[in-house]
Image (cartoon, helix red, strand yellow):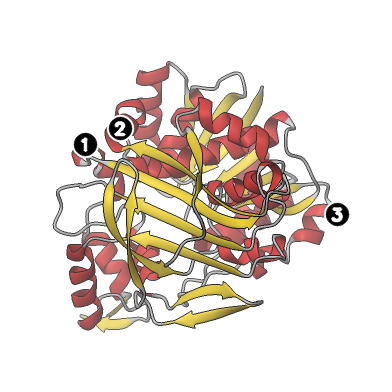
């Protein structure tokens, strides 16, 4: 029985808080804070209606460290779950250190003025958390998060080493909009337009954004075009799986999405540097995010399924030579909406955030310092995936991927 403070009130937060309320034996008190309290109140009302559990709400600017520290000290949670924007990771970590509380997030730090995300800024906090006897768990979403746990489960149960790893993220859902992003538009577009990077032979290799496309047949979704991108779990996987010869991340996009994004890039709407408009500075990408449909509003119209997983090749644990395994989850958008009022993209991130928090609060995962998912025992996390709405399956493939 533990008290938790969740920061952020988007779709992922909504799913996470709903699932926490459905596991009241672990999460005895849920407190929710964001810059816009009305969003917190809306989530709390839905949670009350669906589960009967009460969520306390607050207004806070997560970048104001002294104010956030005071709120944490007032609530005295056992854990702070950061589901705000990646720009806010460091100030929330600072507040947790000041207040003496454990920390969890779903995405690594990204500076506002640069489309770049890496773990170095947060890994630098390790000694400070360790000295205070606190734990920080990074990247407890799906990708990053579950995809890293998938890899470590394969290494624990199927493969002695992982030589090649491909992470495949497919959203086969249709929301009926001409153009919309399935998670925060600003973060989504920054990720997609950044140069692609993959790990090969001990270093990262950079290629132009969206320049490598391959077709893949996804179980229960069908054939989709997927594009090689950079994603932060490649950095942590390369660190914690030193035998990796190659690791890549792939995400599917429809032709209409690519067409709209190309036009928006060409006219400057994806820029993150300020421009003057009517005597005021604005960030074009932030303005675009303001006019696009909010991801949390897409649930009622989104139909179809997601399929996210890992394909790993390496030396088999049983000594039978090299083998390739595909481990993945399929999530239905309509099922996710029926349970939590949110589509599957939010669901597949919010549920693992809840499970990571449960791992810390129950003592299944412990440690002093800053940790990535790869450093933890995958088994209890994998068990909860099966019972909390994200069941997984694993199958052996004939051989390594050919793309």
In this rendering, the label closer to the viewer, 2 or 3: 2
* Residue for badge 3: 131
Could you say which quadrant of the image residue 265 lies in?
Answer: bottom left
Tell me the distance, in whole angstroms, between the alpha carbons under discs 2 and 3.
Answer: 42 Å
Could you say which quadrant of the image residue 49 lies in?
Answer: top left
Tell me the distance, in whole angstroms, between the alpha carbons under discs 1 and 2.
Answer: 7 Å
Dot 1 or dot 2, earlier in sequence: 1
Could you say which quadrant of the image residue 162 lies in?
Answer: bottom right
Image quarter in which the N terminus is found: top right
Q: Nearer the viewer, residue 310 or 317?
A: 317
* Residue for badge 2: 337
Q: Which residue is painted at 33% across and 70% down in the image?
A: 213
Dot 2 or dot 3, earlier in sequence: 3
* Residue for badge 1: 300
Residue 111, above or below 12: below
Q: Are marks 3 and 1 in contact (CB under 8 Å)?
A: no
Q: Which residue is painted at 21% across and 60% down in the image?
A: 291
- Secondary element at image label 2: helix
Q: Is residue 224 visible?
A: yes
In this rendering, the label closer to the viewer, 3 or 1: 1
Dot 3 or dot 1, earlier in sequence: 3
**Residue 259 point in image, percent of width and height:** 18, 71
Q: Residues within 10 Å of mark 2 (few under 14, many from 20)?
A: many
**Residue 371 point in image, percent of width and height:** 71, 53
Q: Is residue 77 visible?
A: no
């Amino acid at each position: 029985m533990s008290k938790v403070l969740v920061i952020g009130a988007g779709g992922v937060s909504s799913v996470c808080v709903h699932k926490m309320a459905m596991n009241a034996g672990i999460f005895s008190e849920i407190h929710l804070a964001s810059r816009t309290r009305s969003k917190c109140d809306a989530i709390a009302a839905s949670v009350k209606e669906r589960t009967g559990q009460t969520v306390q709400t607050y207004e806070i600017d997560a970048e104001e460290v002294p104010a956030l520290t005071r709120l944490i000290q007032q609530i005295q949670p056992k854990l702070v779950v950061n589901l705000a924007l990646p720009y806010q990771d460091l100030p929330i970590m600072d507040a947790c250190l000041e207040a003496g509380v454990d920390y969890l997030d779903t995405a690594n730090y990204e500076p506002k003025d640069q489309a770049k995300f890496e773990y170095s800024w947060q890994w630098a906090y390790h000694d400070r958390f360790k000295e205070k006897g606190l734990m920080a768990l990074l990247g407890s979403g799906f990708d990053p998060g579950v995809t890293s746990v998938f890899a470590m489960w394969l290494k624990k149960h199927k493969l002695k080493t992982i030589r090649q790893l491909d992470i495949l993220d497919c959203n086969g859902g249709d929301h009926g909009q001409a153009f919309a992003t399935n998670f925060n538009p600003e973060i989504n577009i920054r990720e997609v337009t950044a140069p692609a990077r993959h790990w090969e032979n001990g270093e990262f290799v950079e290629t132009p954004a969206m320049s490598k496309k391959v077709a893949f047949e996804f179980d229960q979704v069908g054939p989709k075009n997927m594009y090689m991108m950079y994603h932060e779990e490649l950095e942590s996987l390369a660190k914690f799986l030193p035998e990796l010869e190659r690791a890549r991340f792939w995400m599917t996009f429809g032709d209409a999405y690519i067409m709209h994004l190309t036009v928006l890039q060409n006219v400057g709407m994806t820029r993150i540097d300020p421009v003057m408009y009517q005597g005021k500075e604005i960030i074009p990408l932030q303005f675009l995010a303001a006019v696009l449909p909010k991801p949390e509003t897409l649930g009622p119209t989104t139909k179809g399924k997601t399929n996210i997983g890992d394909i790993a090749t390496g030396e088999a644990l049983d000594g039978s030579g090299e083998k390739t395994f595909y481990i993945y989850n399929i999530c239905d958008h309509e099922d996710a909406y029926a349970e939590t009022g949110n589509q599957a993209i939010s669901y597949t991130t919010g549920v693992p955030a809840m499970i990571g928090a449960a791992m810390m609060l129950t003592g299944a995962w412990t440690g002093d310092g800053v940790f990535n998912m790869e450093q933890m025992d995958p088994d209890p996390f994998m068990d909860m995936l099966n019972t909390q709405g994200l069941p997984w399956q694993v199958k052996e493939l004939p051989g390594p991927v050919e793309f």
